[in-house]
Amino acid sequence: MTAPFLGPDFLLDTAASRRLYHDVAKHLPIVDFHNHLDPAAIAKNKSWRSIGEIWLEGDHYKWRAMRWNGVPEELVTGAADYRDKFDAFAQTIPHCLGNPLYHWTHLELQRYFQWDGVFGPDTADEVWELANAALTQPSRSAQGLLTAMNVEYVGTTDDPTDDLAWHAALKSDPDFTVPVAPSFRPDKALVPTAPGFAAYCRKLGEASGIAVDSFDTLIAALLKRLDFFVSLGCKAADHGLNDLPAFEKRPPRELDIILRSGQNGWPMSAQDAADFKAAVLIELGEAYAERGIVMQYHIGVLRNQNSRLFRALGPDVGGDCMSDSGIGESLNSVLDLINSRKGLPRTILYALNPIHNEMLVTIAGNFQDGSEPGKVQAGPGWWYNDQLDGMERQLTQVAQMGLLSRFVGMLTDSRSFLSFPRHEYYRRLVCRMVGRWVEDGSIPAHKELSDGLIRRISYENARDWFLPEA
């Protein structure tokens, strides 16, 4: 018999998986420890005028699919009306069969708007009217959407120079109790060859009150800002490491020269840039350990590869892809140097290229030290890998080469306030996996084992890392 599309038992193909999801996973809160939501939108309790706006604004997953379907840029990121963009997306969705966007789109319509049809050109008018009417309700404002999905923690992504005014406003708001914590993202301080490096050093100096004129003052300025972040609830730092080349340890006077070269736009070798990046990472890693901050490394992106698109629209618009550069030796070296001096902080490692999954799991195993379970993690399937095959592959490798029960769980990594059904997608998948293990005799049919595993990797492990006072 054909199963209903995205029905109650979607992905749940055994009795054990159905019980695990419906009885254990389904109603657990969400700890979304890494996303790109706008804290101002949360603090202002933003409302959206249309489903076109909330669905398509800033969502490069959808933009890539629309371009792939032959939609002109005017209807993707251009000045066209959101209704026209929405219609172009409706034309695209029927061509997304097999892409996670197809599932995500329909799960969002089901969970936020209680619409369980099949979205496409024939139903676009119906969805437009129904969703727009719902978006006028307080329960579909920014804060209402988070509450509706039982979100218990939001970790945004923030530059060290940000004033965090909206985080401060949220922290003092007695009517909204979901913690929205900044995460420290100092990427612009790591790359002295970047065109804006000098301007960024000046901006960092102004924000910190410390003139950045040496490597030591750069670190001092970053740490002063890190402490400010911590005062507003920061629990995590994040580093977007497009690559991590081999490096050498350099004395402070040589790092000073590299910094000045970057500030003045002088020629610099790739080796100098690599050594500088590693030196900053090591200093920050030690600081995270001292302050109890979770350190995240997102590794292996080739960014802005479509130069024409980048010139027209800037970064983060759908022109990024996987890198195939090697990272193992240098990543081990960075972690080892941090660990050798003051011990590693809790760490999550993400790789965009799935060929690196097993390597990250085994690297994580190198640095477990018995101080706490799963102290170093191979993080969840990231970006192009947060689909069913990518997540299952990553979870299987964690289970086989590490301890799945200590896995920190799922995140959205999204700019969209409608992206939280991705946690459901993940939970249904892990219940399918564990349910199959029970049914085929791979693990005992003991509820305390299977239920405990599902609770931990769906919610409890992330809660314990990011909401330890809970």
Image (cartoon, helix red, strand yellow):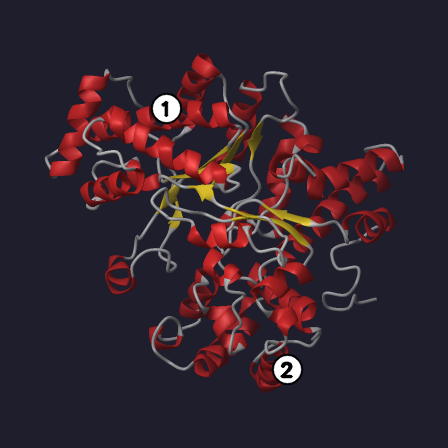
Of residue 333 and residue 144, the one placed in the foreground of this image is 144
Q: Kindly identify which residue carries mark 1.
A: 283
Residue 115 shows in this picture: yes
Position of residue 48 relative to residue 277, above or below, is below
Position of residue 237 relative to residue 21, above or below, is above
Q: Residue at x 66, y 69 (%)?
A: 112
Q: Residue at x 54, y 19 (%)?
A: 367
Tell me the SS state at disc 1: helix
Position of residue 397 relative to residue 433, above or below, is above
Crowding around mark 2 (Cα neighbors within 10 Å: few <14, some 14 to 19, many 20+) is: some
Quadrant in the rendering for residue 226:
top left
Relative to 307, 267 lies left or right: left
Relative to 232, 100 lies left or right: right
Q: Label 2 sits on what residue type?
A: Leu
Q: Residue at x 17, y 35 (%)?
A: 262
Q: Residue at x 43, y 25 (%)?
A: 287
Crowding around mark 1 (Cα neighbors within 10 Å: few <14, some 14 to 19, many 20+) is: some
Give the x, y percent position of residue 451: 82, 40
Q: Residue furthest top?
A: 340
The numbered dot on residue 77 is: none
Residue 38 shows in this picture: no
Quadrant in the rendering for residue 371:
top right
Q: Kindly identify which residue carries mark 2.
A: 130
Cα–Cα span, label 2 and label 1: 52 Å
Of residue 276 and residue 305, the one placed in the foreground of this image is 276
Of residue 237 and residue 375, the one placed in the foreground of this image is 237
Relative to 156, 260 lies left or right: left
Tell me the SS state at disc 2: helix
Pointer 2 or 1: first along the chain: 2
Give the x, y percent position of residue 346: 55, 28
For the C terminus, give its image quadrant: top right
Position of residue 192 relative to residue 171, above or below, is above
